Image (cartoon, coloured by chain):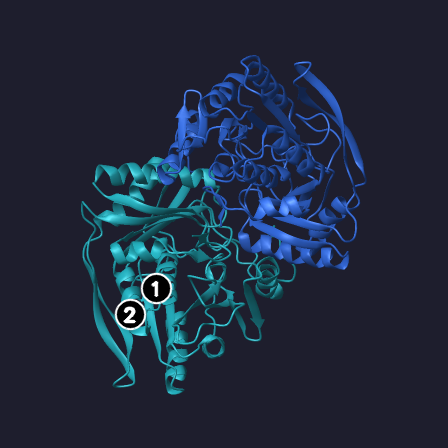
Chain colours: A blue, B cyan
């Protein structure tokens, strides 16, 4: 295993220290671990917090800053942060506007963020949890009941972070986040496995001439193994999977402030159709050269044009990764005026920055 | 070889097409190949153009845009662009303010950019060439007489691009560019080789337990092979190499408008000393996870603090790469007020964006 690390036990701490040294707009807390903005949150502003296992950098810590997250809680590599960690982080940054937790759909994350939300609501701090379950690859997966949460998380953090900055209250932020989730679809593929530092060997075996279609961001198995082929064909397979995905209905839990408990609510993601406007992300999984991602974007753009789908906005780069995995994912989020307005709003974080 | 490409002959064209599809502020020309801004250059503005072999993305095409480059000429992978290509690109974008070519010190690039400058000056278009030779690793190298040009290129393109935007004339831009070069030092290291698509196999062999200190951005041999060790030790070796580098004097050629020919001018890079303020770049070589780069930045920052060197500004990410090489480089540029002013100025390119 060749990695640029020191002691395996210090990997998360040291990358957090490096981020804090490089970016003066964020600061870190190590006991328990979280990354937050250097400036205190404005009174009454909803705080938007995310978190999850480490190994997906820049997500989530790299998205802390003006116009995006207020804080992020990193777990150990591919391991959920703890309820106490989320609770302490939220207590520290919240300032009267309530807390919105953005949670990728992995069993540990869901459970721990729900426990944290219960503790916060019990303290009288209004807290709501929003799940991201946008990966069309497989129905259930290792670590996940239902669809996995992947690339739509990045888009949601940007959009909901901007809305919170603009003064949306907790209900409005939650409604917008649910809308983004219901409009997002993703799928990924792997050329190689990743190596978890503590394991010291590849997460899964894959031959020199095969690729994994539908891989998860922890190396979970996808839809199928196929022979490695050219970028256009791979991009077509992934894009087809997104466009062939039909209306998808599931129940998601949300906190009900009248019953003080979790309620199941139905949510449907409508299939994409001609005429849709999209925010597109072509995302590298950690060790994929940018030049190759542009080769993918070229084909994605061509396919979408042929389907009368407009890619109104895009980001191309490595935003939600799986350590040193080679491969990429495509995320499309069907946009509307509200979504585009908050996408375009100023953002100033280590990993996403524009005005 | 597992890459996200189609036909090997189309690699550069297709990544350019992907960039143009993703970024509406730039446009591309394919015969000959160059990337330029979508908006015409303001009359009288110096145009700042760079170029070189492909395989170092996002450099240079990703740095075309407001506040940075006017255009970039990509060659084939690790191969200089041609004089005709540079000439046609410059003729297309220049608008009365003259042309500044920023050229990394590789024999082919130097020769071809000089020929292009001669052709442009013969046409009455004032053109000056600035060399970057900042790599302290080795004295001469494969493809290079003298020091190689590496990371300082990115810093120079940002700073001189901003100065040109602010109205600096050709002489002033050239003087600023030379100042940046004289104040920049870099060194890199490789964990793995890269694979040139047309070759289909690693550029060099390196064992699972060894690393290359001082590697070049085409996989050129560096100073030494050592056993793989931890990130702190590697970062210390590289940082020491930069700080131990003494005053370095060489002659560089520049165009003399009175004699209409090349003149040799002496330039000295003064050794770094306590009290210096730096712009720092920790740069991934293509397949290095961002989390590992932050682990490196942490140690770099610690070492610099201990030497009373202030890292006033920084970028951490993959900016000047070697295809899919795993490894990183450190660049330090000694700043002053003028350099910091133009570093902080607005930039809006695919790969570097702030305001």
Decide which of A102, B298 is in the foreground and name it: A102
User: What is the chain identity of the residue bearing mark 1?
Assistant: B
Give the residue at x 55% y 24%.
A98
- Give the mark nearer the N terminus: 1 vs 2: 1
Query: Would residue B229 be seen by someone viewing this image from the given angle?
Result: no
Q: CA distance from mark 1 to mark 2?
A: 8 Å
Query: Would residue A231 be seen by someone viewing this image from the given angle?
Result: yes
Q: How many marks?
A: 2
- Tell me where residue B164 appears, x and y as whole percent: 37, 67
Residue B255 is left or right of residue A329, and the answer is left
Decide which of A44, B333 is in the foreground and name it: A44
Q: Callout 1 environment at 10 Å: few (<14), some (14 to 19), or many (20+)?
A: many
- Tell me where residue A221 appears, x and y as whole percent: 68, 34
Q: Is residue B200 above or below residue A216?
A: below
Q: Is residue B170 above or below residue A278?
A: below
Decide which of A333, B310 is in the foreground and name it: A333
Give the residue at x 52% y 54%.
B195
**SS for callout 2:** helix
- Tell me where residue A216 appears, x and y as whole percent: 65, 35
Numbered mark located on residue A196 in the image? none
Mark 1, residue position: B163
**SS for callout 1:** helix
User: What is the chain identity of the residue bearing mark 2?
Assistant: B
Residue A187 is left or right of residue A157, and the answer is right
The image quadrant of residue A176 is top right
Residue A335 is left or right of residue B164, and the answer is right
Give the residue at x 70% y 29%.
A141
Mark 2, residue position: B172
Contact (Cβ within 8 Å) of mark 1 with mark 2: yes
């Amino acid at each position: 295993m060749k990695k640029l690390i020191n002691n395996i036990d210090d990997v998360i701490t040291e990358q957090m220290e490096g981020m804090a040294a490089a970016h003066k707009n964020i600061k870190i807390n190590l006991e328990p671990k979280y990354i937050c903005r250097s400036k205190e949150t404005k009174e009454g502003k909803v705080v938007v917090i995310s978190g999850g296992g480490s190994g997906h950098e820049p997500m989530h810590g790299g998205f802390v800053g003006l116009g995006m997250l207020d804080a992020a809680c990193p777990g150990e590599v591919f391991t959920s942060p703890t309820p106490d960690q989320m609770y302490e982080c939220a207590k520290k940054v919240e300032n009267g506007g309530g807390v919105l937790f953005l949670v990728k759909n992995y069993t540990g994350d869901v459970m721990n963020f729900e426990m944290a939300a219960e503790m916060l609501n019990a303290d009288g701090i209004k807290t709501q949890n929003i799940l991201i379950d946008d990966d069309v690859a497989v129905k259930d997966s290792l670590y996940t009941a239902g669809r996995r949460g992947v690339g739509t998380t990045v888009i949601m953090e940007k959009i909901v972070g901007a809305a919170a900055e603009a003064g949306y209250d907790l209900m409005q932020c939650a409604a917008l986040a649910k809308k983004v989730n219901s409009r997002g679809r993703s799928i990924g593929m792997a050329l190689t496995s990743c190596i978890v530092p503590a394991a010291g060997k590849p997460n899964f075996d894959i031959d020199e001439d095969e690729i994994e279609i539908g891989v998860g961001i922890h190396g979970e198995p996808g839809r199928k193994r196929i022979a490695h082929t050219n970028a256009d064909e791979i991009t077509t397979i992934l894009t087809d999977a997104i466009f062939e995905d039909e209306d998808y209905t599931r129940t998601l839990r949300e906190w009900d402030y009248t019953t003080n408990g979790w309620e199941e609510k139905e949510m449907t993601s409508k299939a994409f159709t001609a005429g849709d406007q999209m925010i597109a992300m072509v995302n590298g999984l950690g060790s994929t050269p940018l030049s190759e991602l542009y080769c993918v974007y070229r084909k994605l753009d061509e396919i979408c044009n042929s389907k009368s789908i407009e890619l109104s906005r895009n980001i191309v780069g490595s935003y939600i990764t799986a350590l040193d995995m080679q491969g990429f994912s495509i995320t499309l989020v069907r946009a509307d005026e509200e979504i585009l307005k908050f996408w375009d709003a100023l953002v100033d974080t280590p990993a996403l920055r524009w005005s």
